[in-house]
Amino acid sequence: MKVVLQNLTKIFPSRNKKSGEEVIAVNDFSFTIPDGKLIGLLGPSGCGKSTTLYMISGLQKPTGGKLFFGEEDVTDLTPENRGVGLVFQNYALYPHMTVKQNILFPLQNLRGADKMTKEEMLERAYEAAKLVQIDDLMDRKPSELSGGQQQRVAIARALVKMPKVLLLDEPLSNLDARLRLQTREEIRRIQKETGITTIFVTHDQEEAMSISDMIVVMKKGVLQQIGKPQDVYDDPTNLFVAKFLGTPPINVFNGYVKGEKLYIGGTEKLEDGECVLETKGAPDGLVTVGIRPEGFIPDESGALVCRLNNVEVMGRDVSIVSTHAASANATVRSIVDADYKIAAGATVSFALKPHKVFIFDKETEKRIYFGDQKPVEIKEEN
């Protein structure tokens, strides 16, 4: 089922009666979610991603804009008439019911033409349980299950109605690290097997990038960037997106461009910086420089010279931790191949990979493209 968000806006009234300032949770959000895809809604707490999910589900009504499932306008439809399955962060299982009863519950509330016989309901419940691999736990109560098993019950309960759209609101937040990894792989498997259009809300960028067909990055209710996870990582449209995606995070420096050359450090008069790269086509001016950790090449004659703190060996990779006067981060973290031999000394010098270096306007924080860099075209799928 294709889902179309058309200028979707949600405004909450102010809690402070004196100031009267409204809170714009989602601001003029337009996006088409292709049929059968898994989309990650990503952003920090308070960015509007859960509010967007609740408007899609019908739990919250938009202040403005339209919402379509396929060609049908569902903006004013109640949640039970939208054909959605919703999985919450806290699972919301009924503690006095068995796993089987929890999964059956949505089917038992069907009325009219949708009403099913007991045999049909049981068959559907066991199909959903088998899909999430809990069909041997049907007689247990939620208190007898692990966190990961409870999560699977919640997903089975959402799937049992065979929804047009599956909505997941931070479903892995309550799980430990190992279980999160396992469960996100299961969610991806289930989505691929069912082919249900799925929208997955998370603040964890690694989580979103690992299982999503596309990610949608939000900030303060405003859409920042849409694209395939790797495309957004490789081609951030602004400084916020560049900083939000990536582990370790991107290294940020103050700098400037002068004569189509990039300098790190220096003054507002565009002088006294270290020339580190040619930036053909970039205009002169102060910039913020972002360098991905894998964008550094240890080179004794390299233009970027940092003060060496320590070297962390991480198996196949080596992490060089250093500092630089122009760095906005406390430390500069560079990931290089373990085959590189780092010379002992007070400093370490780097050459840079141009495609891993991004420059942003100092004021607007929008991306400035240079050389062979160009924005990735987003082709909307039907």
Image (spheres, helix red, strand yellow):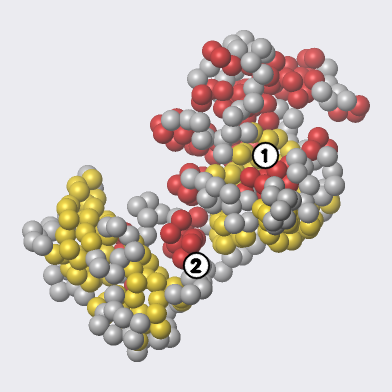
Mark 1: amino acid: Leu
| Residue 110 image position (x, y, % from top left) | 83, 25
**Which is more toward the observer, 126 or 218?**
218
Q: Tell me what residue is drawn at x 91 percent, y 26 percent.
A: 112
Which quarter of the image is occupied by the C terminus? bottom right
Q: Which residue is mark 1?
A: 166
| Residue 13 image position (x, y, % from top left) | 74, 51
Asked which quadrant contains residue 331, the reply is: bottom left
Residue 272 visible: yes
Query: Which badge, 2 or 1, is on the more N-terminal residue?
Result: 1
Q: Residues within 10 Å of mark 2 (few under 14, many from 20)?
A: some
Q: Is 191 left, or right, of 341 in this rendering?
A: right
Q: Mark 2 or 1, which is nearer the eye?
A: 2
- Compared with residue 246, is residue 106 higher up or lower down, i.e. above or below? above
Mark 2: amino acid: Asn
**Which is more toward the observer, 267 or 353?**
267
| Residue 8 image position (x, y, % from top left) | 73, 57
- Compared with residue 313, is residue 141 higher up or lower down, i.e. above or below? above
Q: Is 254 left, or right, of 135 in this rendering?
A: left
Q: CA distance from mark 2 to mark 1?
A: 30 Å
Q: Is 73 left, or right, of 16 in this rendering?
A: right
The secondary element bearing badge 1 is classed as: strand
| Residue 169 image position (x, y, % from top left) | 61, 39
- The single residue placed furthest to the bottom in the displayed view is 259
Q: Which residue is mark 2?
A: 238
The secondary element bearing badge 2 is classed as: loop
